[in-house]
């Protein structure tokens, strides 16, 4: 039997290089294998767990689908759909919530960050975020989840809930693992923390043109002379070089150690390499953007495929948990 892959992409704004290298790359790699069935959904319900713009949400949801199509998700190989179109996600989240505790969910670092960020909106939905994510994954009995390192605490909870369902109700949920890519952690251009769309100056957007990329990379702080211990922001440059311009990396590293490196040369080579990776994605995005009926057809068909699997799991769970089901 094929292994199942599930990923959920939040419907918030533009994708950046961290999302691409940490997540989208893994998603496309998995869809090219013959032993994985891939399901990828834009998690619009998750986007509603923190304050959101109700006029923008539907636009953003479609836009994220377009981004992933442009990154190479092939609807003939992967189901691409919207979380709220498969009502079982919300339904099953209710059952998942019975398998964890308030204490467990309120100690998560992601929850604590959100409480700090939105002190006026600490809702039950915010606390329940990891249960909704667990529902996304277990609904499909997924084994592999191609997310970045920052999602590991959520994955740990999903595994706990799977074990609980299996032990208490005789379910057969696999314990889902993170599918790790080389880009699982892309540091910020500032050198502090991870590349993140909520930190200005930390990221390269997938839509950035060569000029913008050059400007952003040129403003990464570097020492006046190379050599010795690398500063965090210089390390970021080398992480990106290693991922996107591997054959030039060794030569720049040697120049760094020899103290002959001219940072501007490294920066421009890196900018070119980033743009080379992003340009085909941007071209494809342009094409897809002008064909919304196609995009909506992809979303519809994706949901049908997902619903088929999800409805079976929910029925099985309800039966095993003792609810009255009529034939
Ligand atoms: P987010 O934009 O936080 O919703 O993240 C979407 C996906 O990209 C998730 O799988 C994250 O783990 C991944 N991701 C986000 N930022 C980074 C980063 N700096 N490095 C690697 N992966 C990331
Ligand atoms: N929590 C994930 C993030 O912040 C998004 C997400 C929701 C997800 N449901 C998921 C990721 C299911 C993987 C699988 O990016």
Image: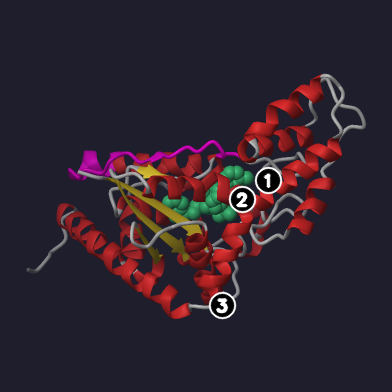
The x, y position of residue 255, in whole percent, is: 80, 24
- Of the 4 image quadrants, the one containing the C terminus is bottom left
| Distance from the alpha carbon under mark 1 to that under mark 3 | 37 Å
Report whether the residue tagged 1 is closer than 8 Å to ligand 1.
no
Q: Which residue is drawn at 67% across and 39% down?
A: 240
Q: Is residue 193 positioned above or below 304 on the image?
A: above
The residue tagged with tag 2: helix, strand or loop? helix
Whether label 1 touches label 3, CB < 8 Å: no
The x, y position of residue 146, in whole percent, is: 45, 45
| Distance from the alpha carbon under mark 2 to that under mark 3 | 33 Å
By secondary structure, the bulk of the magenta-drawn segment is best described as: loop
Whether label 2 touches label 1, CB < 8 Å: yes
Asked if residue 152 lies in the magenta stretch, the reply is: no
Q: Which residue is drawn at 37% across and 62% down?
A: 75
287 or 319, which is in the foreground?
287
Q: Which residue is drawn at 54% across and 71% down?
A: 287
Q: Taking 324 as reference, is 186 left or right? A: right
Give the residue number, with chain letter if any, for mark 2: 277
| Distance from the alpha carbon under mark 2 to that under mark 1 | 6 Å
Give the residue number, with chain letter if any, for mark 3: 54
Please give the range of residues in magenta: 163-185
The x, y position of residue 323, in whole percent, is: 16, 60
227 or 63, which is in the foreground?
227
């Amino acid at each position: 039997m094929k292994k199942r892959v599930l990923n959920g992409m939040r419907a918030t704004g533009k994708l950046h290089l961290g999302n691409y290298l940490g997540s989208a790359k893994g998603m496309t790699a998995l869809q090219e294998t013959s032993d994985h069935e891939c399901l990828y959904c834009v998690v619009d319900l998750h986007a509603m767990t923190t304050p959101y713009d109700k006029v923008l949400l539907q636009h953003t949801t479609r836009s994220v689908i377009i981004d992933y199509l442009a990154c190479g998700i092939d609807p003939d190989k992967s189901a691409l759909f919207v979380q709220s179109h498969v009502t079982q996600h919300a339904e099953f989240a209710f059952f998942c919530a019975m398998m964890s505790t308030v204490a467990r969910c309120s100690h998560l670092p992601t929850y604590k960050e959100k409480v700090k960020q939105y002190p006026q909106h600490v809702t039950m939905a915010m606390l329940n975020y990891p249960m909704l994510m667990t529902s996304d994954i277990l609904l499909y009995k997924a084994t592999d989840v191609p997310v970045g390192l920052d999602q590991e605490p959520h994955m740990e909870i999903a595994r706990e809930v799977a074990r609980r369902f299996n032990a208490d109700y005789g379910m057969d949920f696999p314990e889902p693992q993170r599918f790790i890519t080389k880009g699982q952690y892309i540091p910020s251009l500032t050198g502090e923390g991870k590349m993140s769309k909520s930190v200005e100056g930390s990221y390269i957007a997938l839509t950035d043109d060569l000029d913008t990329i050059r400007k952003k990379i040129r403003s990464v702080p570097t020492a006046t002379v190379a050599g010795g211990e690398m500063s965090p922001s210089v390390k970021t440059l080398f992480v990106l070089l290693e991922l996107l311009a591997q054959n030039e990396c060794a030569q720049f590293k040697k120049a760094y150690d020899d103290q002959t490196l001219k940072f501007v040369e490294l920066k421009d080579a890196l900018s070119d390499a980033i743009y080379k990776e992003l340009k085909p994605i941007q071209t494809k995005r342009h094409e897809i953007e002008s064909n919304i009926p196609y995009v909506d057809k992809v979303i519809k068909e994706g949901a049908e495929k997902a619903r088929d699997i999800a409805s079976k799991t929910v029925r099985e769970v309800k039966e095993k948990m003792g609810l009255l089901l009529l034939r």
